[in-house]
């Protein structure tokens, strides 16, 4: 799939998001910073990526997800937990970097801080009913109704 990308910060021209391996699902996003950014414990900051994408087709969206190494080892996750990029969004991709740890962490300029996953999307339409046509095995059960183990 080809996605239009706009380079907002010229430093990103030769550092566009890439799949690290042939089987990667995520494209690493870099922190387009002028200087190192220190996030104190429990601080969060919106970080520019220096690029914009336009998916255009409403059959796609992109998700911004944490990188597992940064999240697990350093507590650097996302302030919005998951970022959803709409197919019609044309602005700069932004990463809400949140230091959920109790140790300060410094993000270096151009460091890979999160990853972008392009996913298919179905836009649903609602049809109002008073009863669902067929009873399911689950019915209204939820929130652990099937037991613990
Ligand atoms: O981590 C993120 C999340 C969102 N966005 C951009 C793309 C997305 O299409 C737009 C709106 O995001 P969302 O719909 O999640 O936010 P909202 O609070 O509902 O804002 P809006 O009223 O603009 O839809 O912001 C980012 O750049 N990074
Ligand atoms: Mg929205």
Image (tube, helix red, strand yellow):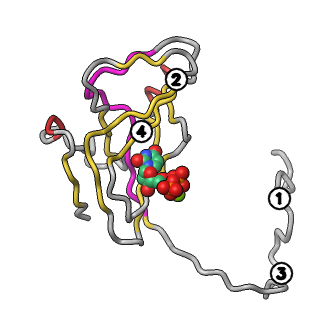
Q: Give SS at disc 3.
A: loop
* Eye-nearest disc, 3 or 2: 2
Q: Where is residue 41 in the image (x, y as percent from the top left)?
A: 55, 16
Residue 95: image tag:
4
Residue, disc 2: 99
Distance in Å between CA atoms under marks 2 and 1: 33 Å
Residue, disc 1: 142
* Eye-nearest disc, 2 or 1: 2
Q: Earlier in the sequence, mark 3 or mark 4?
A: 4
Q: Nearer the viewer, residue 89 or 14?
A: 89
Q: Are marks 4 and 1 in contact (CB under 8 Å)?
A: no
Residue 135: image tag:
3
Q: Nearer the viewer, residue 148 or 100?
A: 100
Query: Is residue 130 magenta-colored?
Result: no
Q: Give the range drawn in magenta.
A: 105-119
Q: Are marks 1 and 3 in contact (CB under 8 Å)?
A: no
Residue at 50% from the left image edge and 32% from the top image edge: 77
Q: Do the residues labelled 3 and 4 touch (CB within 8 Å)?
A: no
């Amino acid at each position: 799939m080809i996605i239009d990308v706009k380079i907002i910060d010229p430093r990103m021209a030769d550092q566009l998001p890439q799949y690290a391996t042939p089987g990667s699902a995520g494209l690493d996003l870099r922190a387009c910073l002028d200087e190192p950014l220190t996030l104190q414990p429990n601080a969060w900051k919106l970080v520019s990526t220096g690029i914009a994408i336009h998916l255009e087709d409403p059959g796609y969206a992109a998700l911004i997800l944490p990188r597992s190494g940064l999240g697990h080892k350093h507590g650097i996750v996302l302030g919005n937990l998951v970022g959803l990029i709409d197919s019609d969004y044309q602005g700069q991709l932004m990463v809400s970097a949140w230091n959920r740890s109790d140790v300060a962490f410094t993000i270096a300029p151009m460091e890979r801080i999160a990853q972008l996953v392009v996913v298919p999307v179905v836009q649903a339409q609602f049809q109002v009913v008073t009863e669902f046509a067929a009873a399911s095995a689950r019915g209204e059960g939820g929130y652990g109704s099937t037991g613990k183990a």
